[in-house]
Image (cartoon, rainbow, N blue to C red):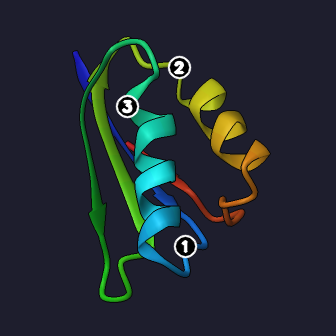
Amino acid sequence: MKKKAVLQVSMKCQKCRTEALKVAAKQEGVSYVGIEGEQRDKVVVIGDGVDFIKLTKKIEEEGWVYPNDQFG
């Protein structure tokens, strides 16, 4: 079953957006990654069997995640 996670991230430039998407895309089970939000500050990840906790930790290590992430 595919699940979706929306991670609000701090991305000030296009390079940061690209790097955040690369980190998300490398996770096992990810079938889609994209950017959403008026200020293009949300990474959307959809996949089957994705470890969203591991994904969040990876992105946190890069310093991009805000504490109010949404998993659904």
**In the image, what residue type sits under mark 2?**
Asp
Q: Residue 12 versus residue 43: which sits nearer the camera?
A: 12
In which quadrant is the N terminus drawn?
top left
In which quadrant is the C terminus drawn?
top left
- Farthest residue to the front: give it: 15
Residue 56 shown left or right of residue 71 in the figure: right
**To which quarter of the image does residue 43 belong?**
bottom left
Residue that badge 2 annotates: 51
Residue 67 shown left or right of residue 15 in the figure: right
**In the image, what residue type sits under mark 3?**
Ala
Residue that badge 1 annotates: 11
Give the vertical position of 46 relative to 15 (above or below): above
Residue 70 pos. (x, y %): 49, 54
**To which quarter of the image does residue 3 belong?**
top left
Residue that badge 3 annotates: 25
Q: Do the residues bearing badges 2 and 3 touch, measured as CB atoms within 8 Å?
A: no
- Mark 2 and mark 1 lie on one chain; the one further toward the N terminus is 1
Categorize mark 3 by other alpha carbons within 10 Å: few (<14), some (14-19), many (20+): some
Alpha carbon separation for disc pair 2 and 1: 22 Å
User: Regarding mark 3 in the picture, which secondary structure is present there?
Assistant: helix
Numbered disc in front, either 2 or 3: 3
Which residue sits at x=54%, y=73%?
11
- Mark 2 and mark 3 lie on one chain; the one further toward the N terminus is 3
Categorize mark 2 by other alpha carbons within 10 Å: few (<14), some (14-19), many (20+): few
Q: Residue 60 carries which label?
A: none
